Image: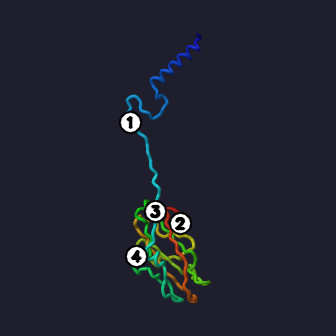
Amino acid sequence: MNSNNLIAVVLIILAALVLIYYPSFGKNNELTGSATEIQVGSSALIANYFAIAASNALTTDGIKWSGLNPGDVDVNADGNNQAGTSNYFITVSSDSNVNVDLCVKASAPLTSGLNTIPLASYKWDSDITNPLLTSAIAIDLVYFGADTNIVPGNSDYYRFWLSVPGSQAAGTYTNTISFKGVQTGNVC
């Protein structure tokens, strides 16, 4: 027997002995010998969740003004309170797990038949305590950020004001106002 064959036989015998006496050789995370414990990592990804709800005044009556006349300026909507909070509010559900930024937009100008009241005449403000006319801006057709970082279980209050042009035709003018919530830091 030459030396190459002898080396090959010795290596085969050694490999067989390793496999017989160490059957887990080359396998990972198995208990061997006197090992009695293995530690592995675990993880859980919790999805972001939030929900918003409109106040009864918003969902039942909507935003409305009663008894307007041509030439009226910055008239309070019927649900505006004169001091403190308003009957118009959006609440972030208490079971939400992230803070929420709120956004608002109009579907179109207030319209009655072929007549409209310009969007610039329809103002709004929001605040977690006291929305003010001095901070009001004109409503727009694209979402505009209202208040930010609303904590679950809290509300954002809104007030609305309308100015009626002096030559405005009589009629019932309507549109739709949309409120949207996004996770704090995201774009409306």
Badge 2 marks a residue whose secondary structure is loop
Q: CA distance from mark 4 to mark 2?
A: 24 Å
Q: Amino acid at mark 1?
A: Glu
Residues at marks 4 and 3 touching, judged by CB atoms closer than 8 Å:
no
Instruction: Please name the residue shown 48% across and 78% down the image.
Output: 62
Q: Nearer the viewer, mark 4 or mark 3?
A: 3
Q: CA distance from mark 2 to mark 1?
A: 51 Å
Comes first in the chain, label 2 or label 1: 1
* Residue designated by label 3: 50
Indicate the quadrant where residue 30 lies: top left
Q: CA distance from mark 4 to mark 1?
A: 60 Å
- Say the numbered circle drawn on residue 85: 4
Q: CA distance from mark 3 to mark 1?
A: 41 Å
Instruction: Please name the residue shown 50% across and 64% down the image.
Output: 182
The spot of residue 155 in percent (x, y) is 42, 69
Crowding at dot 3, Cα within 10 Å, few <14 / some 14-19 / many 20+, comes out as: some
Comes first in the chain, label 4 or label 1: 1
The spot of residue 137 in percent (x, y) is 51, 76
Crowding at dot 1, Cα within 10 Å, few <14 / some 14-19 / many 20+, comes out as: few
* Residue designated by label 1: 37
Instruction: Please name the residue shown 53% across and 19% down the image.
Output: 12
Q: Amino acid at mark 2?
A: Cys
Comes first in the chain, label 4 or label 2: 4
Q: CA distance from mark 4 to mark 3?
A: 23 Å
Crowding at dot 4, Cα within 10 Å, few <14 / some 14-19 / many 20+, comes out as: many
Q: Amino acid at mark 4?
A: Thr
